[in-house]
Amino acid sequence: MSNTSPKLHNAMWPGLVGKGTDEGQEPPISLEKMLDLTAAAEVNGQKFEGIDYFLFLPHTNPEATDDELKKIADLIAGKGFDVGSLVAPVWPGTIGDSAMGSDEQQGKFLSAVKMACRVARIFNEHGVRKYGCIRIDSAEFGVAKWKEDPTSNTARIVETFKEAARIAADNGERLAAEGEICWAGMHSWKDMLDLLEGVGMPDSLGFQADLAHTYLYTLGYNAPEHALLKEGHGEEEFWAAYEQMTDKLRPWTIDFHVAQNDGEVHGAGSHDKTGKHCPADDPNGKLDITRCSSYWLKDFQDRGIKHICWDGCMFPNATLENPATWNTILDAMVKVRDAHGC
């Protein structure tokens, strides 16, 4: 009999992140369209069981009323999905601002966390959401400013994250900090670990591991001094390095993104030069998705992980709108759960 835990989710934000009206950008894909694409996927009778959700326009108005949010919950539930983790709009240009910045910027960051907790409460009370975290990052793009004073700048992010974690705890939520090489203070496995340990609130703030982003951790993009692999490495060296990284970060990991990466950086706008998400069957993909997932999912239940999510951030619209894309992804997700779930 196939495993039923963790639940299989698809992310809604690939319809938004990197999309827009600027030159060279593709238009966003609506929430309902993303839900329909997800609902249509099926592999041997298995379908996606839920979605993870980005709390910003055009999918969600941060100033939406309770009734408007309940209608969104009805829409999601009506497609047969639960909601898992939510993405707080912590970045400049959304609700938030840099966690490393001034008191005003820090206040905006914390406002975004409060907003996410409000939506979480409404979804929880509605019944569409039964598990999951609230995702954050430092919202400080690039490492140049951080490098001017790493100690003080990390301390500032720690201070902001501690307050954010207290807000989440007061609302019965947990925060998951996603390590991406484009976000200051989170741009290498070592800096991410230092940040998590500096906050020191594992019950309220943990780590969100993404296969695409954490692969670049091993290669030392944006932090060559923390590289675990050298150019031209072999398979045995890869798995030794991968185990070293996951042993450090897995105890903090409370949210997990399945993804593929070809060893390159990619992005647009505030997400420039981060881990390139590739289709699950990309011939240039460097990751054995099922085996890599095993390192993160060891003892997953002990860390409160109840679902896993696919992240296809910044896929072209033509890829997102191709039904074959989602069947292939779902197949990869099922293989991960059959191998490492319960």
Image (cartoon, rainbow, N blue to C red):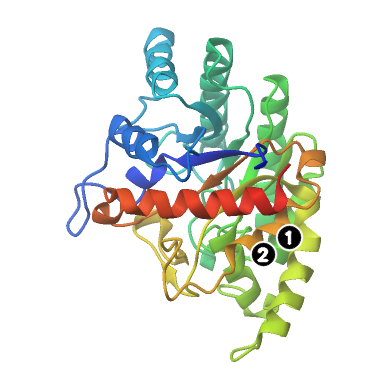
Other-residue count near label 2 (Cα within 10 Å), few / some / many at <14 / 14–19 / ≥20? some
Q: Is residue 339 above or below residue 130?
A: below
Q: Is residue 201 left or right of residue 70?
A: right
What residue sits 80% from the left and 61% below the top? Answer: 248
What is the secondary structure assignment of the residue under circle 2?
helix
Residue 151 image-quadrant placement: bottom right
Q: Position of residue 257 (x, y in %)?
A: 57, 50
Q: Amino acid at mark 1?
A: Tyr
Q: Are marks 2 and 1 in contact (CB under 8 Å)?
A: yes
- Report the residue marked by disc 2: 291
Q: Position of residue 35 (x, y in %)?
A: 36, 33
Which quadrant of the figure contains the N terminus? top right
Q: Position of residue 99 (x, y in %)?
A: 58, 45
Q: Amino acid at mark 2?
A: Arg
- Report the residue marked by disc 1: 295
Whole-angstrom CA distance, mark 2 to mark 1, is 7 Å
